[in-house]
Image: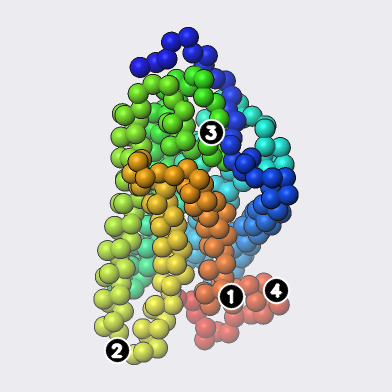
Amino acid sequence: MLKSNATFVTEFLFEGFSSFGWQHRLAFFAVFLTLYFLTLSGNMIIVTIIHLDHHLHTPMYFFLAVLSISDTCYTVTIIPRMLSDLLNPYHTIAFRDCVAQIFFYLTFGINNCFLLMVMGYDRYVAICNPLRYSVIMGRKACVQLSSGSLGTGLGMAIVQVTSVFSLPFCDGFIIPHFFCDVRPLLKLACADTTINEIINFVVSVYVLILPMVVVFISYVVIISTILKIASAEGRKKAFATCASHLTVVIIHYGCTAIIYLKPKAQSLLGQDRLITVTYTLITPLLNPLVYSLRNKEVKDALRRAIWQKPLPLNQAPL
């Protein structure tokens, strides 16, 4: 029931890290700012290298470039405001700005979930059906798959934003988080949120469980196929092409599932905040790090870009 004699809020205040002293917040600011610049520069380097090096003009690296752009947009949506609040913890955010932040955060976050699923499918086709790989994963298919991921993100974001901001927010305006997110906002609503909680759970299951199941099935078939390869060198090479993607998948889906699939009764906002810092700062940084450190083709492309060293004719990309 809606509270009587309630004043509807027009702005929110993030609790964020305001419970920490000035020195701790300054230390957080320095660490988070460093990670933020590393994330932006790392993802932009990946996109630039893939664009400039024609040896990386393959579906796998096309999706990696799209993921890097999406990660950059995702990070820019949250981190600059968080850094500002570390220095000025009592700076409010307007209602419309909160709507915009949660919309773009959900759009790019969900887009990332489905892009990782698409990348898993790409590895499945490359290893399990190599003769038809170029036909199945043609330019048109790649554009359609990446567009479908973004479209799903936009659609689910609209559903979530409509659900959350159709609720009235009365006396409570302090969000127990460092950005506008669904669960903390539902806790502030001064009306029954049962239907909204159900919508949030259904959307969370759809955007997390479906991609995770597809990735899991893909890798079960991939591993089964790799184990049938006769040569040890062939098995090692096949595993190497999947290792980077699998590392990012486990960290991304793991952190996100802990936050959004955990029962409401077990949700501890302080704990959730720490996990959220991990997947808003660390996960986007992991993509360029993992793919550049564990992937031979990307390392070779970086060397060629730095030293202008041509690729030997007998070395072709996978």
Give the residue pinned by disc 3: 175
Q: Secondary structure at mark 4?
A: helix
Q: Secondary structure at mark 2?
A: loop
- From mark 2 to mark 4, how far is it between C-alphas? 37 Å
- From mark 3 to mark 2, how far is it between C-alphas? 57 Å
Within 10 Å of disc 1 (Cα), the crowding (few <14, some 14-19, many 20+) is: some
- From mark 2 to mark 1, how far is it between C-alphas? 27 Å
Q: Secondary structure at mark 1?
A: helix
Which quarter shows the C terminus? bottom left
Of badges 3 and 2, the one in the foreground is 3
Asked which quadrant contains residue 239, the reply is bottom left
Q: Earlier in the sequence, mark 4 or mark 3?
A: 3
Residue 297, percent from left and from top: 53, 75
> What residue type is disc 3 on?
Ile
Q: Earlier in the sequence, mark 1 or mark 4?
A: 1
Q: Residue at x 31, y 29 (%)?
A: 194
Which quarter shows the N terminus? top left
Q: Residue at x 40, y 57 (%)?
A: 254
Give the residue pinned by disc 4: 306
Within 10 Å of disc 2 (Cα), the crowding (few <14, some 14-19, many 20+) is: few
- From mark 4 to mark 3, how far is it between C-alphas? 46 Å
Give the residue pinned by disc 2: 230
> What residue type is disc 4 on?
Ile
Residue 191 in sight here: yes
- Contact between labelled residues 3 and 4, with CB atoms less than 8 Å apart: no
**Nearest the eye: 90 or 151:** 90
Give the residue pinned by disc 1: 299
- From mark 1 to mark 4, how far is it between C-alphas? 11 Å
